[in-house]
Image (cartoon, rainbow, N blue to C red):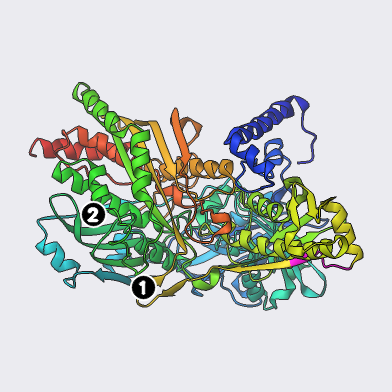
Amino acid sequence: MNKPIDPAVLQPMEAFADYLTNTAARIDADAETRALTQGARVGISRPHESAHLHVAGEATYTDDLPELAGTLHCALGLSPVAAGRLTALDLDAIRAMPGVVEVLTAADVPGANDCGSIVHDDPILCDGEIRYMGQPLFAVIARTRNEARRAAARAKEAAAIDAATGPLVLTPQQAHAQQRYVVPPMHLARSVGGVGARAAIDAAPHRLKGQLDVGGQEQFYLEGQISYAIPKEDGAVHVHCSTQHPSEMQHLIAHALHRHSNEVHVECRRMGGGFGGKESQSALFACVAAIAACRLGRPVKLRPDRDDDFMITGRRHCFWYEYEVGHDDEGRILGAEIAMVSRAGHSADLSAPVMTRALCHFDNAYWLPEVSMHGYSGRTNTQSNTAFRGFGGPQGAIAIEYIMDSVARTLGRDPLDVRRANFYGTDEHNVTPYGQTIVDNVIHDLVAQLEAGSAYRQRREAAAAFNATSPVLKRGLALTPLKFGISFNVKHFNQAGALVHVYTDGSILVNHGGTEMGQGLNTKVAQVVAHELGVSFERVRVTATDTTKVANTSATAASTGADLNGKAAQDAARQIRERLAACAAARHGGQAQDVRFANDKVHVNGRTLDFATLVGEAYLDRVQLWSDGFYATPGLSWDKDTMQGRPFYYFAYGAAVSEVIVDTLTGEWKLLRADILHDAGKSLNPAVDIGQVEGAFIQGMGWLTTEELVWHPGSGKLTTHAPSTYKIPTANDCPPVFNVQLFEGRNFEDSIHRSKAVGEPPLLLPFSVFFAIRDAVSAVGGHRVDPPLRAPATSEAILTAIGAVQRANAGG
């Protein structure tokens, strides 16, 4: 870890860092020059604040922290069966193994043996009932990580288990058939004409019904789950944790230790990726490490092997759908009814809010006058599924996109024309099924701009001409839109705090409640503070997220990181600027409201001072040079019982065109080109936002095409628990032509500098890849048969769909 880097290795890394910097600088260079001249620090493409550390390997993550003397290592003993009852644990042989210091079980948890984020149904260590293969039964603490792992691997020998004799429940369909749910079913309906969805479907000129399977997705963060707990004086504990939600970790650790929150200090400098997997599910690892550290009075680190990480933790919920719609000759949906069933896993975790968001995103960009939706979170003998980028939104929206695609094919119309016919209006037909009026709709202009800029119509004609003369290789093309709501489903989560310190040399330190996982949150917050104080970006430093600095924070999730924490930091910086302005006016004359801060200078009453000079004067005048800031998103409301209200502050929009080629003999495919136009409002940092769009697109493409999760039907074992069996996209999967642009506009709502969130919404853009593949498969039958393509559209799934099309086309 501490070995000096070979200069020969470092040189190309530094060159790559320069490349990243230069690339960011080239983006919108003219606009950046104008902004700098005017003293702006937002709306500028700047490199990620840690980019130089990332490429040089100097960015420290939890596992890179120097280990204190006496540090012990922990590993978890996992259940070898997916269902049953743990009747006894014979741990003497494990305790006698080399290096083992202690073995902990559920009985050793001082407080609540629970790490459930909403419902208290998720034991830290198994307390009797075994719910899935891979469930932690005990924790081994040893001198080294390898010694701990070797001892934990003997779980099968140590555990006496009465295995369940009945069939396992592994799929959403099985859970739904048995009415096994982790939370009560949800129902959301809207009737504009008073006839109801069922009657509208029955009366429609055309009806369509079907089923759809959409798989889950592993977060596959580069840095796995990890916690490093250090006991402190008087029973307190300091936990370094790779988590998106330090405050929740603090709360759950305190409950597990039966202590107060002020005795638990949780800190996170950065994560090597999170994608939702570290919102709630970092809790088990944080709690075990803290319990062990406090019990033994020594630091304890828990970093599971990647395979164990897969086996223990949950991921994106897979969904199964049954739907029926009625539509007219133009493809307009007159009535729709859908049942969504998710694979929730063995406990509730975040399945309820995930399903809520799925139901609230079934409409996507479309006006659905008569609609009835039903959501079921199926309890299964699998890992408890959790947050993943999009948080149910993608699972909800893909269902209506599948329906639109099928309606277009049955009518023989271009899918884009059917989609456009169903778009929300701007002054009517603009109320969602959950009662929120859409006031910021830009989907018409955005799609029209992308359609023209991508030459969609010409390329569709070219694809048809190619397919007419190519019996084996088929091209497919699709344009899909998105509308994504921004805010937490739960109103009180939409708040944030921040601290801003200005030191007497003019340097600035910022701390806020958000966590940095590579998405550029700290970069944007630093830009906001620099802009508010009129100083250079280089003056501002953002420190680690820390529960002893900003308390009671929300998770960095729901794409709200910059919205909430940026506003809070802006509030703190504004208070300091106003104090400095009053000080400048008192010393140099003029009015405080006329003092201007820009480019590290302060302009007051005809004089120009260095920012640091004014700060020094303010200190001598005993002016407070630090401040706290707070922000709460206004105007939100939600009734979870009626599923009505205004759950989202605003919507982000976007659209993508994808073109693929499919080998109909092997099921192989390749993305030839992608054109993306995404709405980020008045972007805080175009370079960072474009990077987020690109990353979300490729990640979502992986979810819908290659990332297949498979559980053994007999044992319940997750067989795709390593990179050897689970295929994420690589650089080679990026299209050779990849055009990404941000839509020109500004947020209708008073968000931070009128920007829009860009973390989760772009994950819906690769719907276009899936439907382009479906279009290519449809070409096998001359577009006369609607292909039953499931997601992920693996080569096997593609061949299955091609076979179905060929049989149907042949009348068999």
Q: Residue at x 84, y 62 (%)?
A: 589
Residue 769 within the segment the image draws in magenta: no
Magenta span dominant secondary structure: loop
Residue assigned mark 1: 643
Q: Does 33 sit above or below residue 230?
A: above
Of the 4 image quadrants, the one containing the N terminus is top right
Query: Is disc 1 surrounded by few (<14), some (14 to 19) or many (20+) residues within 10 Å?
Result: some
Nearer the observer, 271 or 17: 17
Q: Amino acid at mark 1?
A: Met
423 left or right of 35? Answer: left
Q: Looking at the image, which residue sits at the far right?
A: 620
Mark 1 residue element: loop
Q: Residue at x 42, y 69 (%)?
A: 646
* Amino acid on which the number 2 mark rests in the picture: Gln
Residue 151 placement, left or right of 326: right
Q: What mark, if any, has residue 265 been given in the picture? A: none
Give the foreground label among 1 and 2. 1
Q: Is residue 80 left or right of residue 305?
A: left
Q: Is residue 626 magenta?
A: yes
Q: Position of residue 614 (x, y in %)?
A: 85, 56
Q: Which residue in the protein does label 2 denote?
A: 211
> Residue 166: horizontal and vertical position, in percent?
33, 65
Give how far apart the Cα atoms at labels 1 and 2 are. Answer: 25 Å
Q: Magenta segment, which residues?
A: 622-627
Q: Secondary structure at mark 2?
A: strand
Q: Position of residue 72 (x, y in %)?
A: 74, 57
Q: Residue furthest top?
A: 469
Q: Is residue 490 visible?
A: yes
Query: Number of numbered discs present?
Result: 2
| Residue at 68% over, 31% down | 18
Question: Could you tell which of marks 1 and 2 lies nearer the N-terminus?
Answer: 2
Residue 227: percent from left, percent from top: 67, 58
